[in-house]
Amino acid sequence: MLAELKGLNEECGLFGIWGHPDAAQITYYGLHSLQHRGQEAAGMVLAKDGKLTGMKGEGLVTEVFTAEKMKNLSGNAAIGHVRYTTAGGGGYENVQPFLFNFQNEAMALAHNGNIVNANQLKAQLEAQGSIFHSTSDTEVLAHLIRKGGFSDLKSRVTNGLSSLKGAYAFLIMTETEMLVALDPNGLRPLSLGILGGAYVIASETCAFDIVGAEFVRDIEPGELLIINDEGMTSERFVMSSQRAMCTMEYIYFSRPDSNISGINVHTARKNLGKQLAVEKLIEADVVTGVPDSGNSVAIGYAEASGIPYEMGLIKNRYVGRTFIQPSQSLREQGVRMKLSAVRGVVDGKRVVMVDDSIVRGTTCKRIVTMLKEAGAREVHVLISSPPIKNPCFYGIDTSSREELIASENSVEEIREIIGADSLTFLSVEGMVEAIGRPFEGENRGQCLACFTGNYPTEIYTNEQSTTIIS
Amino acid sequence: MLAELKGLNEECGLFGIWGHPDAAQITYYGLHSLQHRGQEAAGMVLAKDGKLTGMKGEGLVTEVFTAEKMKNLSGNAAIGHVRYTTAGGGGYENVQPFLFNFQNEAMALAHNGNIVNANQLKAQLEAQGSIFHSTSDTEVLAHLIRKGGFSDLKSRVTNGLSSLKGAYAFLIMTETEMLVALDPNGLRPLSLGILGGAYVIASETCAFDIVGAEFVRDIEPGELLIINDEGMTSERFVMSSQRAMCTMEYIYFSRPDSNISGINVHTARKNLGKQLAVEKLIEADVVTGVPDSGNSVAIGYAEASGIPYEMGLIKNRYVGRTFIQPSQSLREQGVRMKLSAVRGVVDGKRVVMVDDSIVRGTTCKRIVTMLKEAGAREVHVLISSPPIKNPCFYGIDTSSREELIASENSVEEIREIIGADSLTFLSVEGMVEAIGRPFEGENRGQCLACFTGNYPTEIYTNEQSTTIIS
Amino acid sequence: MLAELKGLNEECGLFGIWGHPDAAQITYYGLHSLQHRGQEAAGMVLAKDGKLTGMKGEGLVTEVFTAEKMKNLSGNAAIGHVRYTTAGGGGYENVQPFLFNFQNEAMALAHNGNIVNANQLKAQLEAQGSIFHSTSDTEVLAHLIRKGGFSDLKSRVTNGLSSLKGAYAFLIMTETEMLVALDPNGLRPLSLGILGGAYVIASETCAFDIVGAEFVRDIEPGELLIINDEGMTSERFVMSSQRAMCTMEYIYFSRPDSNISGINVHTARKNLGKQLAVEKLIEADVVTGVPDSGNSVAIGYAEASGIPYEMGLIKNRYVGRTFIQPSQSLREQGVRMKLSAVRGVVDGKRVVMVDDSIVRGTTCKRIVTMLKEAGAREVHVLISSPPIKNPCFYGIDTSSREELIASENSVEEIREIIGADSLTFLSVEGMVEAIGRPFEGENRGQCLACFTGNYPTEIYTNEQSTTIIS
Amino acid sequence: MLAELKGLNEECGLFGIWGHPDAAQITYYGLHSLQHRGQEAAGMVLAKDGKLTGMKGEGLVTEVFTAEKMKNLSGNAAIGHVRYTTAGGGGYENVQPFLFNFQNEAMALAHNGNIVNANQLKAQLEAQGSIFHSTSDTEVLAHLIRKGGFSDLKSRVTNGLSSLKGAYAFLIMTETEMLVALDPNGLRPLSLGILGGAYVIASETCAFDIVGAEFVRDIEPGELLIINDEGMTSERFVMSSQRAMCTMEYIYFSRPDSNISGINVHTARKNLGKQLAVEKLIEADVVTGVPDSGNSVAIGYAEASGIPYEMGLIKNRYVGRTFIQPSQSLREQGVRMKLSAVRGVVDGKRVVMVDDSIVRGTTCKRIVTMLKEAGAREVHVLISSPPIKNPCFYGIDTSSREELIASENSVEEIREIIGADSLTFLSVEGMVEAIGRPFEGENRGQCLACFTGNYPTEIYTNEQSTTIIS
C-alpha cells in the first residue's frame, strides 16, 4: 500500500561513513536511498580536521541539501539521518543527528528506533537538573553518556545503553571515532559495508548498492562497533541478546532491493504472494497489487495461481506534499488522487487485489470502492500479513489499539466494512515460513508483536503518545 | 524507460472545461493527471463573469498552483496546459495558455503538437509588422486569427487553421465560448467528456477518471468543436482528413490507464509484450521491465513466455529536479541514481530486460551494465517498438537524425554498443497488430514516421531546431 | 513625505551603458541608485557578442538580481529599468526592458514617462492585426518601429516617435547600437555621462556618482542620440521643442544628491524652505520635516527663520512590503508604523511641520494627529509646493481629480480637515524662483500643470485610468 | 554612523507583555520598533490557555513573522527578542526566546546583555552532566534555575541570578507568570509600560509609543518584577546595586525617539553636538552628519556654531543584506554603496563631518575620502564621544583591543590615517555633562569603561571571543 495513504509510518534511516574524502557526498546519496524510511527531515554531521559540523532541516534530502549548501560541506567521516513524516511536524529541534559542542569534546548522535522507557529516564534526569531541548527519546542517551563518570567514550556509551529498553540503532560520532550500537533484540536492521578503505553503515543494504559499497555483514544484536582511523573493533555491550527483527521491514518498510539477514525483500514479498496462493486460491480474472509494496506480492500470487498479473491500479507519481487535497464536495464528484483504478483493465473483471497490511481499513475500503466504480465485477482482497491487533512500541507509528481495525473486528466484519467480496489474511506461520529467516542460533528470531501481542522487551504502560519516534 | 533518462520527451497536455462552478479546481486535478506529458511549466486561464484571468509559471502543477494561489482562482470555464521539460528551459514567455487582452476582446490559447511551417508563417507575419513575444509556434495561430478580416471567431479560427501544417490540438477560449480543434491527421490524442452539465476536454482519458468525468468520444481529425452556454456544436474545418495517431503514445507517452481510440494503453503494452514473445522466445530465468513503461510489456512477455516476471530494476522515487548529480569520480565509484538493479533478483540469472524504445542508446547501455554489475549472467534486451530511424516533426523532441542510434547502426551494432547478449526490436507489423487499432474508415490510421520515414504531412526542410514544441 | 505613504507615485528609472566590459554589474549599481523611482520591478537587457539577453522580475533590484543570477550576466552594453509600485501589481509581462527577438534582428526597449495617446495608437494597430502582450504604453513604440517601411533603425525610430504624444525618455538597444530619445518637452530628466571610454545614460545624475561616471550633459528635448562602437552622434527628431521639466522632480521625486539642469535637488529643496520663510514666518519652538523629502525643506526653513531644526518625526526604517498592517482595532489602540513622532522633541512645543506636497490629505492628517498625541501644543503645516489641483498625464500616478483634496477644497478647508493650527502652501512664483531653473532659451521651462492646469501637450480625454505608467 | 558599516554591533532587544488578548500582534509591533537593536534573528513565545508556544527564525521581524505565520499565533502574554547581526551567523539554536518544555513545567527565556562569567559557569555545569544546546550565555541561567532545589520559580530565579556577573536584562515566562530581572548595575536599559490593563516591558521606550502603551518607569538595577494575573510585585534580588547605564546607548545604539532615564536620545545627541561646538569651533562652510546617528549631533553643532547644517551625505535606503558588493576592481572604478556624498552640497566647501564614534577607523576614512572626491576643500571630523580604547564585555560587539584604532594611536595619528584636515573627539567630562543623566542616588551612574577602562563589574580574562552575545 502507498506509504502516504496508510496509518503505518516508517521510522527513520541511518547512514554513516568513516574514512572517505567524499564523506559528505556519499552520505547525501546514502540518505537519498533511504528516503523511503523518512521524508520529514534530514541531517548530517561531518567530521573534518578534528571538528564536527552539522547541517539539517525539514524536508526531503534534496530539499535540505541543496547544491548550494552541499558545496560547503566536506569531511572524512559523517553520520546522517532521515526522519519520517508526521502530521503535526515535530520541529527543527527534533531533526537529527543531534550535534553537541561541549567545552571538552564534541559529539553527534543519530538514532533509529524507539526507547520504551524514555519518559521514565527523562523524568529522572530532569529531576537532577538536566535540560532536554528536543522531545525526542534520542536525547536521553546523550545525557546518560555525559552523566557517566567514566573517562572514555566507549565506557560511557556502554553504561548509557545499559539503561535503555526498546528498539534502537545508534550512530555516535566524535572528532576521532564513530560508534555503532544495536539493541539486544536487533529489532531494526543495520548493516556494515566497505567502500575502498572506508567503513559504511546503513539501515538498509540498498544504500550500499547506491553508493557503490560492498556489503560485509549485518550488525549483531547487542553489538557495539568502534571505528576510527586505526580500524574497527567490535564488542558486546550486553551479556545476552536475542534477535527479534521487525517483520514489517519485510512486509512493508524496506526497499525491494534491500536484503535483510541475507533475504532479498522483493523475493520475500513474492514468496508471501506464493504462500497466499497456497492458503487461498481464488477464482478470478486478474491479479493486481496495491503499489508499491503490494506489487511484488501480487506477482508472486499471479505466478503461483496462474491468474494473469495486471496493472489494475496505478500511482500518480507527481503527488507530493504540496498537492492540494480536493474538498469534500469535489471528492464526492469523484476527484481522485494518488491512486487510480485502470478501467481498461478491471472493467467487468473479477479482481484479486493484493496489499501488504490493513491498519485502519479506510484506505483499503477506498481502493475497493475505486475498483468497483471502475467496473470490477468482484474484488477479492488478499493481505500478505496477519491482522495487526497490537500497537508497536519499537518505532513504527501505528495508531493506538482502538484505531487498529483488526483489534476490534473479525475478518468477516472487516470484509464487510471495506466492501470486498472476500478478504484473506496470511497466517502467522505461513508468513514466517514464506519470509524464511535463517533458523539458527540467537539471530534467527523476528518480532511478531503487532500480530501476536508477544513483545520481546518490557513495555512501559504509561508511555505517552506524544513521544517522537526516531 | 524512465522519461527523465531518455532523449524522447513528452510534448504537452491539454485540459479544458466549460460550464462548471469548480472549473479552477477541476482543471488543477486534470492538469495534474497529465503531468507526465510535461513537467516544465503549467498554466490555466479562467473565464468568470465575462472576464478571462490567467495564471502560469515554470514548474510542476503543484508548484505553480500552490494552495495560496488556488484560493484566488475561480471561474465557470477554464483551459489549462502542461509543458514538457527541456534542458535549456524556455522561459516564462513560452508558458501556456497564452492570454491576450485586446481592446475589443480577450482570447486564450493552448496547444499540443508542432506546427511544421511555423517559421515560414512567422517570417511572413513579421514582414507585415507583427511582433511575436514567445518563441513558440503556438503564437502564430493567434496572429492569424487577429489578422482575419472575418467578424466571428469561428470563421477567423477556421481561416487561421487553414494555413497551418503539422500536428496540433488547440484549445481556444474567449469570455463566451471555447473552441477545440484537432489537425486533419489527428496526430495527437484529444477526447471529450462530460461532468454533470459541463463539457470536458483532455489530451488523455485518464484525466476524466481523475476528475470524475465520463468519457464521451475522441475528437475527430479536422474537427472543430464550439462550446458555449447554449451547448456544443461540431464542424469540420477541412474537406478531407485521415487519422495518423502517433504510435509512440501507445508505446511510451500516455499513462497506462488512458484509452486511445478505445484501446487501453496498459493492455496495448501488455499485448506488445506478448507479440515480442511470438517474435522472439528467449531462454532465460527472469523477465524484468525498465520502469515505468517497460513494466506492462514485461508482464505480457512473462505471461506469454512462462518466464517469471520479477522486479529486477527499481526506480528511486524521490529523484527530482533538485537532485544533485554525482560527479564523474563519484559516478566511477559506482554512485547510482534514479534506477537500481536488484541484486537479490538478478544475481546469477539470465535476465530478459524489456524496454519500450531505444533513442540514443546511452541509457540502455547503462542499464545493461548495471544489471551485469549486479550479477546478471546474461542480459537479453527486448524492445517493444521497431528501431527509431527518423526524427519526429510533430511534437516529440527526438534528437536529430544523427543522434538516433538506429539511423546509423544495424541491430547487431546496437547490441554490441549497449553490451547486451541479444537485442530484439519488435517488427512494425507486429507492433501495429499488437496495438490493434480499429481498422475502419478514415480514423484507423496511425503515424509510423519515426520507424518508416513516411510522414503523413509535408515537411519543411529548413525547420529550425530552436522551435519550441508545445 | 514618505513615498510609501502618499498617493503620488514615482514613475520609473532608466540606466544604460555602451562600451564597458562590466556593463552588467554597473547597470546593477546604476539601477540600485535609481531604486527610489520604482520598487515594483526591475530588469536589464545585455548586448554581448552580437546577441541580446535579458533578465527581469518583480521586486527590488536586489531581489531580482541575486548574486547567483548576476554570475550569469555579462555584456559590453546594457539598458536597465526600474518600475514603480502599484497596488494592483502589473504582472511580469509589463516588466521592462522589453526584449524582442525577431527573425531578422533583436531589439530591447525601456521607457520612462507616459504616452498620452497610447490607447488611440493601440486601437489603430490592433485593427491592423497587431498583438500587444503587455498593457504598457511602451509597447506601442515597438510596433510603430516594426511597422515602419524604412530600412534603418534610426529612421524607423524617428518615424515611430513622430506619432507619440506625451512624456517619454526611451532607451532602445539592438545588437549593434543604443538609441536614446527624449520627448520634445523634455518632461522627464535624462542625462549623459562618461565612464572610461563608455557612454552612460541615467534618469538621474546620482547614478553617475554611484558608478563612478562623470556627468557630461543633460539630454535635450527632442534629441535622439545614436551610440555604437564608432562613437556617439546626436540628432533632433522634431522641428521645435520646448523644455517643460516636471517640477515634482525637484519637489519630491529625485534623490537629494541628483542635479537636474545643473541644480542640486537638496539645495533646491532647502531654497524652497527659505522661500517658505519669506512667504510665511511662524512663531514656533521647533521646525521638523516629514522624512525624507521634507527634511531638506525644513533645514532651509529653520536656517532662514532661526527656529531650531529638530527630528520631531522619525521613519521606521525596517518597514517593508512584508510588514503586517495593524488591524483597525489595533490601530485604534495606537499601534503605529512607518513614522513615529518623537515625544521628547515635540511635547509641549509649537511645532512647524514641513512637507513637500499634499495629495489626498489623509497622510498629512495622520501626521498632524500623531504630533498632537505626542504633546505638540500647536502644529503648523508648511508645504513646499502649491496646491495640486490637476491630475498628471505624464507619468506620475496622482489620483484622479476627485481624489485631489486641493481640487475640491480651499486652503482653509484643507487645514480644518487635516487638523492643523495653520496651513501654508508655497506660491507658484515663489516655488519657481526658489528652484531657480536657468531662464534662457528653449530649455528654461518647467511643467506646472498639476498646479496650474496648463498642460504642455495635447491631452486625450478618454485616456483610461488603467494605463500602466512606465 | 551607519550601523551596518561599523564594527560596533547592537546587542539585542526585549519586548514582553502580560494580560492582553492581542499579545502576539503587539509583540510583533514592539519587536519591530526594536529592530535596530538586532537584525539577525527574532522570536517570540506566547502563553495561552496554560500553554507556551514559540516561534522564531533567522532574519528580520517581518521575515520571521510573515502574515501567514502570524495568523496562527495568539496568546494573552508574550515575550519576544531580536538579535544582532554577526558575520558568522549563529544558528537557529541560538535564536531567542529559548523555550523549555519540561515534564513538570514549561519556561521561556529571553536575554539582553552579556554574562561575563558564562564560560566558567558552563564548565561547572557540564562537569555535572548538563548539556547546552546553544552557544549562548543565556542558557546558563536556565540550567541554574533548573538545578535549584527550591520549589517556587522566584526563589530559583533569584538563586540563579546570584551566580551571574555582567550585564543582563532577562524576561522569563511560564504558563502563569512573567519575571523581569535587571543586573545590579543596570547596564542595559529596560522599561515598564502599561497598555490598558496589560503590563508591557521593553528595552527602549520607543516601543511603547509604537504600540500605544504608556511609559510607567524604568526597571531599577537589581530589581526583579513578578507579573501574573493578580498584578505586579517588585523585589530586589541583591543587597546593593549601582546604576552604570551604558553610555553608548545614548551615543549610538538607541532610537532617537527613545528616552533613557528620562532623557530623550535625540536631544542628548543634539546636546552632544552643542558641547562639541563648545570644545572645538571650526571655521567651515557646512556641517553634515554621518547618517543616521550623526545627524542629530550635526544639527546641534550647526545650531551652536551658526554654520549651516546640510545633507552632505545620504544613505542609500535600499541596501540590504542581499545587496551584491562591488568587486575590488569596480570599487576602484568608484562604485559606491550605502552612503553617497552630495556633490552639489560639498563641492568646493570646507566641511564639518560629524559622527558618533570611531571604532576601527576604516569606515571613517572611507567617508572622508568620499567627501574629498566629491569636491570638499577641507574635511573636519568631529566625534561625539571620546576615543574608544577598551573592549566592552557587556553586550556590545566591539572588536578586540588590537582592532580599536584609538587603543594604539594618538588622535593625531588617527587623523592622519583617516585623512581628515582635523579630528576632534569629545571629552569624557563634556560628554557626561551634555547627556546630563540625573545625578542623584544609586541610579545616576553610567558606564564609561570603553573610554576609561574602569569596568563596573569583575572581568574574566579568559573570556572567549566566541561567546554569543544576547
Image: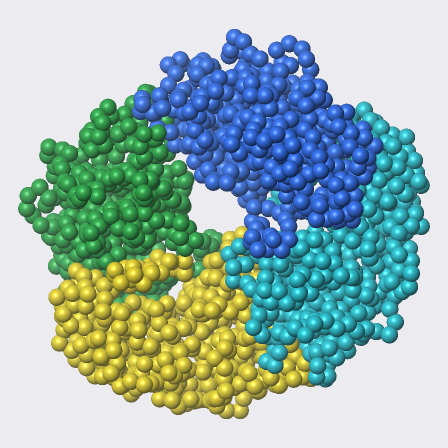
Chain colours: A yellow, B green, C blue, D cyan
Q: Position of residue C358 (x, y in %)?
A: 62, 33
Front residue of D426/D175: it is D175
Whether residue B249 is visible, yes or no, is: no
Q: Residue furthest top?
A: C239
Is B378 located above or below residue D63 in the figure?
Answer: below
Res A260 → quadrant:
bottom left
Q: Position of residue C461 (x, y in %)?
A: 44, 23
Front residue of D175/A338: it is D175
Number of labelled discs?
A: 0
Q: Quadrant of the N terminus of chain A?
A: bottom left
Say which residue appears at 45% left-offset and 83% top-offset: A393
Say which residue appears at 17% left-offset and 71% top-offset: A351
Q: Position of residue A276 (x, y in %)?
A: 23, 80
Say which residue appears at 63% left-offset and 53% top-offset: C335
Whether residue C116 is visible, yes or no, is: yes
Say which residue appears at 51% left-offset and 11% top-offset: C238
A66 sits to left or right of A346: right
A49 sits to left or right of B23: right
Res A425 → quadrant:
bottom left
Q: Position of residue A143 (x, y in %)?
A: 63, 79
Is D99 located above or below residue A21 in the figure?
Answer: below
